[in-house]
Image (tube, grey):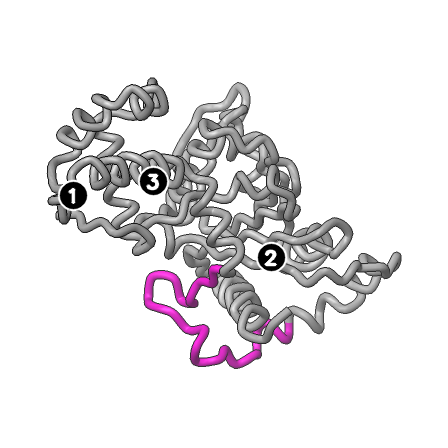
Amino acid sequence: PDNIQREKFMAAWAYSYRNAYIGAPKNGHTIFIAGGRGVGKNFLTECLYGVSMGGYSDASDYVLGTTRFNARLFEVGVWTLNDTVTKGNPQERSIFSKFLKKLAANHQHIFEGKFKDSFALEWQGRILVTLNTDPMSLAILPDIDINNTDKISLFKTSDKVLDDKDAADHARKEMGALCSFLLNWELPEHCIGNARWGVRNYLHADLAVEASNSGSTASFGEILSLFVRDSFASDQKLDCLEGSATWFLQQMLMSDTIREMLRGTVSANSIGKHMGALAASGSFPLHYK
């Protein structure tokens, strides 16, 4: 829907294609594509992106941790997760986020097939995740924090429905022209990134907000806000609250209401991580040292 977003997506695609074309693939961002139903998300990932990169395979079960067998996945350059990840529960989301971060950053992975010995191999393909824009689907967006903000890109489609029933046939006929374009297109200067990633990532503002609001850190931030508000209300002389994560946990547990909210969900260690993430986000009046 806007030129900068389109250029960032095409730059990531062209960078991946060119390196694969010369037989020297490089690591790249995990790409999320959110949009309404029928706008062509699966067409983009399967008929265009996946075909141009030598094939694609559905990796939902492996990425979500429901199977450890992944032999068929390493035969292709693109893994897709098309509207299959919709539960959005915290445990699934945590597994999903950690797995994607590891896949994007590492170039060696464990190959494991049924009744076969496992071994390490190099794979530097791409993972494309498509999802609808309803709240349940968007809940699977990974946490945006200092550890993974440079490893993912979040794109949002326009609302225009893809109504071409022959789109797949057209894609096959024009694939050579598309690949030629990817190979020869001059990347805009604002899309070129550092040596590690090659191109700059893109975080659509709406999706970045959804990702931040859906995470466990955001939930803790709301509880922390209640605690801070009550602390300042009860002592008008306070101008700041300062202490270790353990101190904050101790103080928060003294409140019956806050204690019930925190029950079984946090420890001193996890509070420290949440506070570090809140400080890094810049969205919370908190300084971490």
Judge whether residue 192 is colored magenta: yes
Q: Is residue 79 above or below residue 262?
A: below
Q: Is residue 151 above or below residue 98?
A: below
Residue type at numbered disc 2: Met
Residue 266 lies left or right of residue 59; in this view the side is: left
Name the residue that disc number 2 marks: 53
Residue 198 lies left or right of residue 41; in this view the side is: left
Name the residue that disc number 1 marks: 236
Label 1 secondary element: loop
Q: Return the disc, 3 or 2, that comes first in the chain's sequence.
A: 2
Q: Which residues are magenta?
A: 180-203
Q: Return the disc, 2 or 1, that comes first in the chain's sequence.
A: 2
Which callout, 2 or 1, points to the residue nearer the camera? 1
**Circle 1/circle 3 CB separation < 8 Å:** no
Per the model, the C-alpha gap separating discs 2 and 1 is 62 Å
Residue type at numbered disc 3: Gly
Name the residue that disc number 3 marks: 221
**Circle 2/circle 1 CB separation < 8 Å:** no
At a point 62% along the width and 48% down the height, the residue shown is 130
**Residue 232 visible to an observer of this rendering:** yes
Label 3 secondary element: helix
Which callout, 3 or 2, points to the residue nearer the camera? 3
Judge whether residue 200 is colored magenta: yes
Label 2 secondary element: loop
The image quadrant that residue 175 belongs to is: bottom right
Residue 243 lies left or right of residue 188; in this view the side is: left
Q: Is residue 97 above or below residue 198?
A: above
Q: Position of residue 230 (x, y in %)?
A: 26, 35
* 28, 97: nearer the viewer: 97
